C-alpha cells in the first residue's frame, strides 16, 4: 500500500475533530509505531499478515484499500515531524491566549513612568501610597451643591465608567454628613486655606478625594484624576458630549458625526477583540469590562501652577471655526490645565460678532469674496449662520443658508448684488498664481452662540477673553461702515493676509461706535480682561486727516503714531465702568498715560518686556519663536535649511537671539533652531510662516525670557533681588497663539496645536528646576498620544 493510501486511511481513522485532544495525538503516535513494526515483520517473513479484511473482525482500527504498503524510515520521520508541528501550533495558540489575558489586565491599569502616574502638566508634589483603588460594581460620587464644575466632572466620570465598565454609578449632591453611605469619589470645595488654582487629589484603597477652593481648582483635580485612568478608557469620558459640542449640517455634517463617534469606535476596537464583540457594538450591547479589573494607584497629589495666566489664542477672523469646533479647542486646552481662551473675533478678513446696533458689521463685514487657504477642505455649519455663494460658471447655483431668527430679517441680498457690480471683486491669485474663485466666505457668532461658548468654558475652569481689534486691522469694520474711516471710501473685506492701511479715524463718532460695541462685549464675556488689539497700525491715513489733527491738538499729542493712545484711553474708561480691565498687544505700552491696571501681551521677540514689567505693568509673554503654534513644527534640534530672504519677523528673532545669546533657554534643554557662527537662526520658510520645534516650546519660560540677566544668576545683588520680586509679580504668565491664515480646517488646527500645547502648558505650570525633557517625551510617547487618539484629537508625531 502506498503512503498516500495510508494517509487517507489514517485521516479516516482519526477525524479532525478528535485531533484537538492530547489523548488522540498519543493514540496516533502508537498506531504509527505499530505500522512500522508490522512492516518490518512483513519484510522478514515475506507474509501479508499486517492487514486483516474488514469482514473478519469487528474491532479492526485500520482497513486498507490495497496491499503491498511500504512505510520507509524517512516517511516515518516526516509523519513524526508533522505531529511535532501540530503540537507546537497548539502550544502557540495557548500562549497567545495567555498573552491576550495579560494584555487585558495591563490595559485595565494606568501607565506608570519612573514609578509615578503619568500626569500633565507635571504636578508639584506626587507621593505614591501602597495599594490600589479598585473600581467595583457600584460607585457613588458626592459633589458640592454649589459647584457646576464638580457636577459636570461627575457626569463625565459617570459617562466614562458606564461606557467601559460593568458598573452602576450614582451621583449625589451634598456633604459627607448628609450622605447615606460613604462615597467612593468625593469633590470637596473649601472656603479658604488654598490658593485660587491649588488642588489636591488623594487616592486610597477606600476612596478618592478631590479638593480645591475654586471651580478652576476642582477642574484641575478632575483632569488629574482622568489622566490616572488607563488611556484607552479616558476617551470614553467624551462619548456622550454630542449635545455639548453641538450638531452640524451641510458639508460639515459627515465630518462632525465622524468626530463625535470616533472615540467610541477607537476604544471599542481595542476592547472588542478581548470580549468577542463586533467593532463598534460593545457600548450598545451592554457588555463591559468586568468590574473589579480596573484599578488606580493609591497616591497623594498636591499641585498648583507657577503662573496664573496660561492662555491660548484662537483666530476665528482669518478662518472661522464652528461653535462645536470652538468648544473642542476649549476642551483641549482645559485638559492641559490652560485657563484663558483668547478669542480673536475681528480683523481685516472678517468681523465675527453680531452687534444689534450695527447690523452691517455681520451683514457685510462677516463675509469676503475669497480666501487663500485650501478651499477644498472648507467646513461650514449653521452654527456660524453661513452664507455661501458660488458662481454659476462653476456649475453651482447661488444659495443663502437660512439665518437664525436673531439676525435673519436684517440679511439683505442687495449687499451681494453690490459686490457683483464691483469690477474689483472676482478672481484673485495668491503667491503661487493659483486662481481661487470662492464666491463669498464667512460667518459670525450670535449672542446665543457666545453665551453657549462661555458657559461651556466655565464648566472647565476656562475664561473666554474676547479681542476686538482697534484702531488697526479694521478693514471689515470699514467695509461695513465706511464713515468710520478718515476718508469715506469703498472698502472691501480682504481675503489676503498682511498689514493694511485700513485704520479707524479718531473722531468722536468712531469713539461712540466703539463704546457701543464694547458695551455688548462686556455683557457677553466673563473674563477680567478684554483685548483691544492696538498693534500694527499704519499711520498714513491719520497724517492726512483733519479730524485726527483736531483730536491730536485737543489731547496735546505731537505725532500721528500717538493716535492709538486716544483709543486706549477711551476704552480704559469704558472698561472701568463695566468692572473690566483692558489688555492689548505690547504696542499699547508706548502710551505713557495708560492706566496702571492695563496689561500687555508681549509678542515681539525684541520687545522690552523687562522695562515694561519693572514700571508696574502686568505682562503676558507670547514670543513668536516659542509660542506661535501656526509655525510648522520641526524636529527638535534639527538643523533647518537656511534661506536668505528672511522676513522682518525672522530678522527680529535673529536679532533677539544675538542680543540675548539664548539666555532665555536652559542649557540643559535641547537648543531650539540651529545657530550659525554669528548667532543667526536657520529657518525653512513654508506655507504657514516659519518653524518652531517641540523642544523650543518646552524650553519656554516667561521670566527667563523677560530677564535672563537676573534669572540665570545663582546669586543676586540687593538691587537685583528687588527687581526679581517686581518681575515675579508683574510677569503673570504666557500665551500660545494659533493664527489661522494657513489653517482652514479643524484637523489642521489640532495637528498644529498638539503636542506643542502640552509642552507650553507644562512650561507655564511647573517650576523651571522640575523640568525634565526626557521624562516629558516619555509621557508623550507612552501615554498622552494614546489619550489623544482615544479622544480623536489630531496631533503631530514628528518628535514622538
Image (cartoon, rainbow, N blue to C red):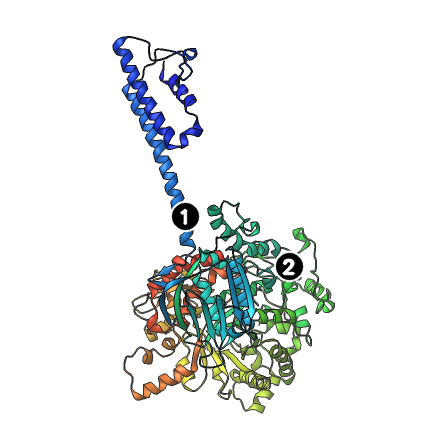
Give the mark count. Answer: 2
Q: Quadrant of the N terminus?
A: top left
The label shown at residue 668 is none
Task: Name the secondary structure under disc 2.
Answer: loop
Does residue 644 appear anywhere in the picture?
no
Whole-percent x and y of residue 115? Answer: 33, 62
Residue 252 position by quadrant: bottom right
Question: Residue at position x 37%, y 11% from top?
Answer: 67
Provide residue 263's location: percent of width, then percent of height.
Answer: 52, 55
Q: Residue at x 70, y 69 (%)?
A: 407
Position of 604 relative to 289 (above/below): below
515 sits left or right of 132 in the view: right
| Element type at mark 1 | helix
The residue lying furthest to the right in this view is 409
Mark 1 highlights which residue?
101
Give percent across and percent down for residue 624: 43, 70
- Label 2 crowd bin: few (<14), some (14–19), many (20+), radius 10 Å: many
Camera-nearest residue between 226 and 295: 295
Whether residue 31 is visible? yes
Q: Looking at the picture, does residue 110 appear above or below residue 716? A: above
Amino acid at each position: 500500500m502506498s503512503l498516500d493510501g495510508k494517509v487517507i486511511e489514517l485521516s479516516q481513522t482519526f477525524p479532525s475533530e478528535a485531533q484537538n485532544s492530547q489523548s488522540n495525538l498519543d493514540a496516533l503516535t502508537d498506531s504509527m509505531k505499530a505500522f512500522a513494526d508490522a512492516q518490518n515483520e512483513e519484510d522478514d517473513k515475506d507474509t501479508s499478515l499486517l492487514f486483516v479484511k474488514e469482514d473478519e473482525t469487528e474491532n479492526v482500527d485500520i482497513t486498507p484499500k490495497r496491499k503491498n504498503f511500504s512505510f520507509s524510515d524517512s516517511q516515518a520521520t516526516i509523519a513524526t515531524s508533522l505531529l511535532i508541528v501540530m503540537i507546537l501550533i497548539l502550544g502557540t495558540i495557548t500562549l497567545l491566549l495567555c498573552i491576550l489575558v495579560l494584555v487585558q489586565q495591563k490595559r485595565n491599569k494606568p501607565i506608570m513612568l519612573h514609578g509615578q502616574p503619568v500626569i500633565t502638566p507635571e504636578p508639584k508634589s506626587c507621593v505614591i501610597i501602597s495599594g490600589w483603588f479598585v473600581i467595583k460594581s457600584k460607585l457613588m460620587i458626592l459633589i458640592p451643591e454649589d459647584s457646576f464644575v464638580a457636577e459636570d466632572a461627575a457626569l463625565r466620570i459617570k459617562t466614562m465608567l458606564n461606557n467601559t465598565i460593568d458598573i452602576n454609578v450614582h451621583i449625589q449632591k451634598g456633604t459627607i454628613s448628609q450622605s447615606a453611605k460613604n462615597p467612593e469619589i468625593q469633590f470637596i470645595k473649601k472656603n479658604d486655606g488654598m490658593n485660587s488654582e491649588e488642588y489636591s487629589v488623594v487616592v486610597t484603597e477606600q476612596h478618592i478625594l478631590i479638593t480645591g477652593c475654586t471651580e478652576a481648582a476642582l477642574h484641575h483635580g478632575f483632569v488629574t484624576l482622568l489622566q490616572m485612568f488607563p488611556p484607552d478608557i479616558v476617551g470614553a469620558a467624551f462619548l456622550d458630549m454630542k449635545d455639548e459640542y453641538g450638531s452640524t449640517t451641510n458639508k460639515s455634517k459627515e465630518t462632525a458625526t465622524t468626530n463625535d463617534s470616533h472615540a467610541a469606535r477607537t476604544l471599542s476596537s481595542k476592547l472588542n477583540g478581548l470580549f468577542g464583540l463586533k467593532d463598534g457594538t460593545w457600548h450598545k450591547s451592554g457588555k463591559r469590562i468586568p468590574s473589579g479589573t480596573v484599578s488606580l494607584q493609591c497616591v497623594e497629589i498636591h499641585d498648583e501652577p507657577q503662573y496664573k495666566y496660561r492662555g491660548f489664542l484662537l483666530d476665528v477672523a482669518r478662518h472661522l471655526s464652528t461653535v462645536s469646533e470652538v468648544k473642542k479647542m476649549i476642551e483641549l486646552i482645559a485638559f492641559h490645565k490652560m485657563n484663558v481662551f483668547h478669542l480673536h473675533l475681528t480683523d481685516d478678513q472678517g468681523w465675527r460678532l453680531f452687534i444689534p446696533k450695527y447690523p452691517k458689521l455681520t451683514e457685510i463685514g462677516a463675509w469676503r469674496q475669497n480666501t487663500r487657504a485650501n478651499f477644498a477642505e472648507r467646513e461650514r455649519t449653521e452654527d456660524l449662520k453661513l452664507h455661501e455663494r458660488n458662481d454659476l460658471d462653476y456649475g453651482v447655483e447661488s444659495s443663502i443658508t437660512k439665518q437664525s431668527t436673531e439676525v435673519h430679517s436684517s440679511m439683505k441680498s442687495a449687499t451681494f448684488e453690490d459686490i457683483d457690480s464691483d469690477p474689483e471683486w472676482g478672481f484673485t491669485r495668491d503667491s503661487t498664481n493659483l486662481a481661487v474663485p470662492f464666491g463669498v466666505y464667512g460667518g459670525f457668532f450670535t449672542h446665543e452662540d457666545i453665551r453657549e461658548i462661555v458657559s461651556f468654558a466655565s464648566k472647565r475652569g476656562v475664561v473666554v477673553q474676547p479681542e476686538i481689534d482697534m484702531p488697526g486691522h479694521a478693514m471689515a469694520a470699514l467695509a461695513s461702515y465706511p464713515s468710520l474711516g478718515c476718508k469715506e471710501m469703498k472698502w472691501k473685506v480682504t481675503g489676503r493676509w498682511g498689514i493694511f492701511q485700513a485704520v479707524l479715524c479718531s473722531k468722536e463718532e468712531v469713539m461712540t461706535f466703539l463704546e457701543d460695541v464694547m458695551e455688548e462685549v462686556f455683557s457677553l464675556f466673563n473674563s477680567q480682561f478684554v483685548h483691544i488689539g492696538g498693534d500694527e497700525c499704519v499711520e498714513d491715513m491719520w497724517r492726512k486727516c483733519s479730524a485726527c489733527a483736531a483730536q491730536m491738538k485737543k489731547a496735546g499729542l505731537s505725532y500721528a503714531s500717538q493716535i492709538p493712545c486716544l483709543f486706549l484711553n477711551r476704552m480704559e474708561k469704558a472698561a472701568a465702568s463695566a468692572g473690566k480691565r483692558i489688555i492689548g498687544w505690547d504696542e499699547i505700552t508706548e502710551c505713557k498715560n495708560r492706566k496702571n491696571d492695563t496689561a500687555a501681551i508681549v509678542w515681539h521677540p525684541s520687545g522690552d518686556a523687562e522695562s515694561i514689567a519693572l514700571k508696574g505693568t502686568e505682562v503676558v509673554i507670547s514670543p513668536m519663536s516659542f509660542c506661535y503654534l501656526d509655525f510648522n513644527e520641526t524636529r527638535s534640534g534639527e538643523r533647518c535649511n537656511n534661506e536668505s530672504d528672511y522676513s522682518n519677523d525672522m530678522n527680529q528673532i535673529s536679532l533677539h537671539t544675538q542680543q540675548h545669546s539664548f539666555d532665555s533657554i536652559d542649557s540643559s534643554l535641547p537648543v531650539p533652531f540651529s545657530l550659525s557662527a554669528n548667532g543667526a537662526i536657520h529657518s525653512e520658510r513654508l506655507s504657514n510662516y516659519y518653524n518652531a520645534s517641540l523642544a523650543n516650546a518646552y524650553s519656554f519660560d516667561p521670566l527667563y525670557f523677560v530677564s535672563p540677566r537676573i534669572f540665570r544668576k545663582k546669586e543676586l545683588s540687593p538691587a537685583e533681588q528687588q527687581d526679581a520680586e517686581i518681575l515675579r509679580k508683574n510677569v503673570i504668565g504666557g500665551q500660545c497663539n494659533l493664527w489661522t491664515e494657513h489653517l482652514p480646517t479643524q484637523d489642521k488646527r489640532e495637528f498644529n496645536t498638539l503636542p506643542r500645547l502640552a509642552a507650553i502648558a507644562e512650561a507655564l505650570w511647573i517650576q523651571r528646576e522640575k523640568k525634565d525633557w526626557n521624562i516629558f517625551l516619555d509621557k508623550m510617547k507612552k501615554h498622552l498620544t494614546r489619550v489623544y487618539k482615544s479622544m480623536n484629537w489630531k496631533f503631530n508625531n514628528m518628535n514622538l
